[in-house]
Image: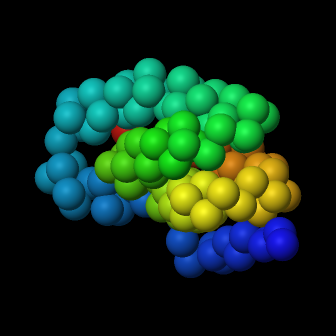
Amino acid sequence: MSKDLTLPGSEMPVIDENRLMSEFGGDEEILAELRDLFLDHAPPLYEAIVAAVTSGDCESLVKDAHSFKGACATYGAPRLALICKEFEAWAKQNNLESIRTNLHHLDNEYRAVFEAIGSIGVR
């Protein structure tokens, strides 16, 4: 049975800039390096998740969703991390139907994160 993903409202930002600034002491150089690492690692992880969903490979999906969740949490993308957490849990249950039903949420949030990265104070 397919489950719908319930996303948080606007109280949870796409990018938690305040957390990033406080966690890294406002060090713009460290934040820029972290951003660049995220921008390098996020696309292959996202593509791996989509490929695993397409092929029905729950084992890879568990691993890839877990890795992407960590990258999102580290960079301060809590909404995308939450989606990855749900995908990881569903993949552990072999619940591809729920993942496929909610794949558009992953795609939308992924795009929102990349848009938000360009508009925050980290350059």
Q: Quadrant for the C terminus, please.
A: top left
| Residue at screen point 44% across, 49% down | 66
| Residue at screen point 83% across, 69% down | 2
Q: Position of residue 79 (x, y in %)?
A: 56, 61
How many labels sit on residues?
Answer: 0
Q: Quadrant of residue 122?
A: top left
Q: Reply above or below: 15 against 116.
A: below
Q: Please indicate, yes or no, whether residue 118 appears anywhere in the rendered image.
A: no
Please state which of residues 60 and 35 is positioned toward the viewer in this rendering: 60
Q: Position of residue 15 (x, y in %)?
A: 49, 54
Residue 70 horizontal side relative to residue 116, left or right: left
Q: Please indicate, yes or no, whether residue 98 appears anywhere in the rendered image.
A: yes
Q: Position of residue 42 (x, y in %)?
A: 50, 32
Q: Position of residue 40 (x, y in %)?
A: 44, 22
| Residue at screen point 30% across, 54% down | 20
Q: How is the image coloured?
A: rainbow
Residue 48 horizontal side relative to residue 75, left or right: right
Please state which of residues 8 and 33 is positioned toward the viewer in this rendering: 8
Q: Quadrant for the N terminus, please.
A: bottom right
Q: Reply above or below: 25 against 114.
A: below
Q: Reply above or below: 2 against 54.
A: below
Residue 15 horizontal side relative to residue 58, left or right: left
Please state which of residues 91 and 6 is positioned toward the viewer in this rendering: 91
| Residue at screen point 69% across, 49% down | 106
